[in-house]
Amino acid sequence: MADRRRSSPRAPDSAYDKTNKAPQGNSKTSASAKNADAQEHTFSVLVDNEAGVLHRVVGLFSGRGYNIESLTVSEVDGGEHLSKITVVTSGTPQIIEQIRAQLDRLVPVRKVANLTADGPSVQREMGLIKVVGSGEARVEALRVADIFRAQVVDSTNRSFVFEITGSSEKLNAFIELMRPLGLADISRTGIVAIARGDAGM
Amino acid sequence: MAEQQFIGGDIILKALADQDVDVIFGYPGGVTLPLYDRLYLQNRLRHILVGHEQGAMHAAEGYARSTGKPGVVLVTSGPGATNTVTGLVDAMMDSIPLVVITGQVVSTLIGNDAFQEADTTGITRAATKHNYLVRSANDLARVLHEAFYVATHGRPGPVLVDIPKDVILGMGPYMGPENVTPRNYVPRIEPDMAKIEEAVELLASAKKPIIYAGGGIINSGPEASKLLAELVHLTGYPCTTTLMALGAFPAADKQWIGMPGMHGTYEANLTMHDCDVMFNVGARFDDRVTGKVDAFAPHAKKVHIDIDPSSINKNVQVDIPIIADAGLALAAIIKLWKKKKKAADAKALKAWWKQIEEWRSIDCLGFDQPKKDFIKPQHALVRLQNALKGTDYYVTTDVGQHQMWTAQYIRFEEPNRWMTSGGLGTMGYGVPAAMGVQVAHPESTVVCVTSEGSLLMNVQEMATISRYKLPVKILNLNNDRLGMIRQWQELFHSNHESECDLANRADYIKLAEAFGFTAIYCDDVADVDATLAKMLATPGPVFVNMVVDRRENVFPMIPSGAPHNEIVLGPNQKLKKMDDRNNVMA
Ligand SMILES: Cc1cc2nc3c(=O)[nH]c(=O)nc-3n(C[C@H](O)[C@H](O)[C@H](O)COP(=O)(O)OP(=O)(O)OC[C@H]3O[C@@H](n4cnc5c(N)ncnc54)[C@H](O)[C@@H]3O)c2cc1C
Ligand SMILES: Cc1ncc(C[n+]2csc(CCOP(=O)(O)OP(=O)(O)O)c2C)c(N)n1
């Protein structure tokens, strides 16, 4: 038999490019790429505070190709060992529905609320912003902080640390104003959120 | 008074006994030695010492799928635990309930890179439905009972419990399953009656209906299969069953139109494509079934019954989602259908069946077996089916061409009779799975259909089969190739047979004999029947090496990413220009 390996040239590497770059699995569920009809949604997830629970939630997002724009977690009920995870994500309506269902089926997850879809909510973030400078810039930084109701929580004769709370947009605006004034370091909590009204989760 | 205290090892064995476990598949190691010592002192639980931990996993899967009970595995830390990962993912994908107990290094050494330490819960988090690291013997009984509960409730799946050596040796109280209520995990199983009502209306309004049943029917239990048959007969509608649901509806029934999907029948696929109402119960719109999603059943209104909300609208958007146990939902639908005195649109249904019969008459699974040529693998399986007829049989497969042919030609009239790796497509599944099935059903005929590539992946379990005198029959369809790979290379890669040659790997007859099997060789069409009869009649484990036509391909075939109506019937029908880009091999 003729050596068929030689009978036709191999496809150029570029022929495989599409395959290699294509997201794995169903293209609809791998929505890490920004999609035209992608929307941002904030989920509140009440979980049993057991070992590995955060890993489980984060692993779900990375394993299925969902975005995490912001993530916060803290124990909210020490007696019951419950923690609340607030996660901001984005995706098409179908992906958002999947995210809720996927979160809901994790065994240590008690409740999932989509704060964006289920009704009005309050969303807040805190930032600690370090600004280093002297002279006019230092004075200006204090003035801006005052307008934004940011607190000075630490100071040296060359620096301030401001504590600022509000929407993420407010923090972004504050940071941008601080940038030319000697912005040196930023720590942000990520978003925490809660539904408006009298109902508990 | 202080609660009575038990040693950890005994708590584990007591919990297994209280969970009605009669057999565990396992392999010992350093950290589980104290548990094996307790095991030695009792004789209630049977332990099957496998050849490799992956073998234990698939054996437990076979056991679970053929009994409806969870399978149990016991392995050591480190390599013992990592060897279970493929089996865990396999069970996850196919919704098989397993409880896997892994030993862990002594608690105080965790995190120190101790000998045979692996972060088992970390490694298996995405491979399990849930997993636990037990920190104290006080928690042991509760966690084990919870593990069984989680594995078997809602969508079944594998649960892993990692137990450090000091917990196995520690002292703690025991509590029975009746005292353990998982705080939180309460899957919904009762259907929403408003949705049931909508579904009944839609079903009754159908002109071109199809009932598309999946593995969820089998997960739900034998009652669901009975209800499925009742609904199919009540409506008169055609029924297709996925690879995972073969046997959920009797193959002998005239209303069964075969398996849908990539290697499904022509009639099932065209019925799916053209239908106006699709009633999916316990199937997950897998891409091997839907093909191109945008062109999937484009004219159909769809009902989807699934116990797992994440299965709904995952791949295909449906009109009536029903989150419920398949059996309960079917019962509700049947009840309402009868109460409302619904009946199918007889005229439309007659026309629909006429169309389906036309498709069926193409005989898409037909093939020619020349008298003087290689044995066609299809022929081997048709003859196997003939030989099995009337016997109490279970069949497992490995993964590849032989798997698809077995699905196409072997008939299952009941659920829990057919074991295959569908979602993960794990080569090496078949032999250990057959072992697990035979352990559960010692008097029944258990046949594993395999091929060399897959066989060699867990061939060591032939030693286990032999050691426990399990009369498993292995039918090796020897094509000297990674057949499914060769098929795709022929169809999509210019026939470049790149690294798929398995010729001259082993003398399979000697190999089987070395493992204590009766080995039979067959390469002549004239001997097929006699060989299969001998295989089934010979007591003890039997291995048949049947040399088949290595050029044969599996048809029909819907190239992955293509719509159903682009189904390719066979080598004679000109293959559409097939583009490999969207194709994903098993
Ligand atoms: C080489 C190869 C080729 C293949 N070709 C085909 C093919 O041609 N055709 C084909 O059909 N498959 C094929 N498969 C298999 C395919 O990959 C999938 O495994 C299979 O189609 C999935 O079956 P299913 O939809 O029945 O779902 P399963 O995987 O069985 O999932 C069961 C579904 O039911 C739900 N469920 C579980 N318990 C319950 C309950 N109690 N009540 C209600 N719902 C429940 C689950 O949540 C899940 O959504 C192939 C596999 C391989 C390896
Ligand atoms: C563990 C594993 N590795 C690789 C594959 C990819 N694969 C799918 S089918 C196949 C060939 C199977 O060959 P064989 O077992 O001889 O069966 P045949 O197709 O010849 O019937 C391969 C390599 C797989 N499914 N599983």
Image (spheres, coloured by chain):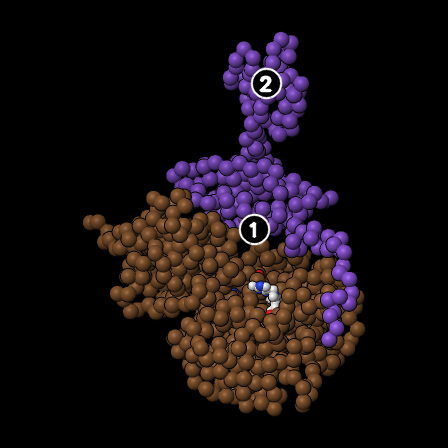
Chain colours: A purple, B brown
Q: Which mark is residue A131?
A: 2
- Outermost residue on the top side: it is A135
Q: Chain of mark 1?
A: A
The crowding category of the residue bearing disc 1, from other C-alpha atoms within 10 Å (few below 14, some 14 to 19, many at least 20), is some
Q: Secondary structure at mark 2?
A: strand
Residue nearer the viewer, B51 or A94: B51
Residue at (52% x, 42% y) in the render: A45
Is the residue B149 above or below the residue B331 in the image?
A: above
Whether the residue carrying mark 2 lies under 8 Å from ligand 1 is answered with no
Image check: B358 left or right of A174?
Answer: right
Q: Amino acid at mark 1?
A: Gln
Residue B582 seen in render: yes
Name the residue carrying label 1.
Answer: A102
Pick the quarter of the image with the C terminus of chain B: bottom right
In the rendered image, residue B396, in percent from the top left (x then y), is placed at 52, 74
| Coordinates of residue B393 in the picture (x, y in percent) | 50, 80
The residue lying at 24 percent from left, 53 percent from top is B5
Asked if both marks, 1 and 2, belong to the same chain, the answer given is yes
Indicate the amino acid at tag 2: Val
- Image quadrant where residue A122 sits: top right
> What's the distance in space between the residues labelled 1 and 2, CA to CA?
42 Å
For marks 1 and 2, give the one nearer the viewer.
Answer: 2
Tell me the element at label 1.
helix
Q: Chain of mark 2?
A: A
- How many numbered circles does the render carry? 2
Q: Is residue B202 above or below residue B173?
A: below
